[in-house]
Amino acid sequence: MPAAPGSNLVRAIGRWSLIALMVNFTIGAGIFGLPSAAAGILGRQSPFAYLIAAGGMGVIAACVAEVASRFRQAGGPYLYAKTAFGSFLGLQTGWLLWLTRVSSACAVANVFMDDFSGFYPRAREAVSRLLIRTILIGGLAFVNVRGVRTGTWVSNVSTIAKLVPLLILIAGGLFVIYVHGSPVPVVAESYPAGAWLNTVLLLIYAFSGFEAALIPAGEVKNPARDIPVALMAGLPIVTTIYFLVQVVVVRMLANPAQTDRPLSAAAYVFGGTTMATIISLGALLSTFGSLAANMIANPRVTFAFAEQGDFPQWFAAIHRRYQTPYISILVFSVLLWALAIAGTFRWNATLSAVSRLFTYAIACAALPMLRKKFPGQEGFHLPGGAVFAAIGVLFASVLVSRMGSAELIALAITAGLSFVNWLFVRGNKMGTEDEGV
């Protein structure tokens, strides 16, 4: 493997913090809204769609685990693609990754404001909304500039805080079902294959995001060892929680598709107003945790660009005292603040969905290429890796085929920006070579 560029980043993210970061990224705002959508398509069978979606994402995660075990630098899928396929595809992947992360964080920021307004109605007012959003994003930026240890601590705490209400919902709901039976009669249901496919495609959003935890690899204590473990541990944790939450929702609510807050509604059935309030608070903490995790990983994309010579060098600047990529953190924070104000949840979520599947496919395709170019240098070797890679690419391709025109237009814009970046980098390198001559 090519030698890692030198940097002064602090390797402060341990194995358990990395697992928490991965869970924090994956369990975001979607868990509080997707159960209604899934139940609206597959009814009482919808919990099993989570298992199918988890199987497909598990194939991709397994491929990423081997690929990621080769790298100790920041960058994630951008660095994997650049090393495997060269600068052009690397930059395409990097821009897709960056826009995925920025737009996803913006969507979460919008959801946070909606959840917060349930506790503080004045947050719906334009001035209050602007002030709260500024304090939220500015505060997270301040915490992360002061050090990755502090940012990781915030992510760990928020991960625990978001999981506790979900576990209470699962335990309370399953206890009531076990002791008193399901309030909703269980009847045999059957659905066509198209309904299953549509639900699985919908739920891919619930499992996406794990790749963002790989971006700050330059600050992971032992990435070759810890990243594969975190991937293999994080996915089963997330799948179990998703499956059991869906079971409680469809067994507690007669019409779960008719509510925008299915988890709170299910909690109200067996726990009244108090339990419903706890779950609503969990939704707020979940979105906050996702923002905290995004603030750790996302600025490392532009940092990795600059570290690899594909972006202005000041994006790679490291704070003398706190040893953090503070310029990248501040730029990301300003962009997040601006786009969260200008865009809606749907608009930002669309941008996020467009690029993610291509990133997954490229990461899977990188596995056999890296084996060929750098044999025996992986920290984790996936048995049957070539087969897994082919299945992962096929799985992502099927999902891509379901995209609409809006997503394709956003993808084309992203590819155009990346192409301009590549031309600029190529021109600079050619000019440097001419000067050397």
Image (cartoon, rainbow, N blue to C red):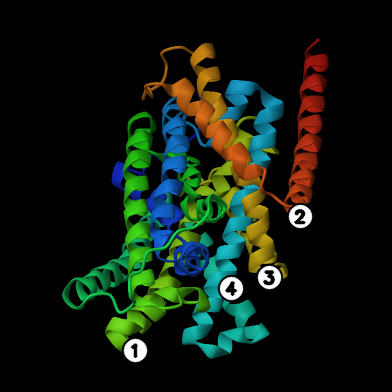
Q: Earlier in the sequence, mark 2 or mark 4?
A: 4
User: Which residue is denoted by mark 3 in the rendering?
Assistant: 341
Residue 374: x %, y % from top left: 49, 13
Left or right: 396 in relation to 378:
right
| Cβ atoms at labels 3 and 4 below 8 Å apart | yes
Residue type, mark 1 in image: Thr
Direction left: furthest residue: 179
Q: Secondary structure at mark 4?
A: helix
Q: Earlier in the sequence, mark 2 or mark 3?
A: 3
Res. 350 in view: yes
Q: Secondary structure at mark 1?
A: helix
| Residue name at image x 46 percent, y 86 percent | 119
User: Which residue is denoted by mark 2 in the rendering?
Assistant: 406
Q: CA distance from mark 2 to mark 4?
A: 28 Å
Q: Tell which tag, 2 or 3, sits nearer the viewer.
A: 2
Q: Tell which tag, 1 or 4, sits nearer the viewer.
A: 1
Left or right: 341 in relation to 373:
right
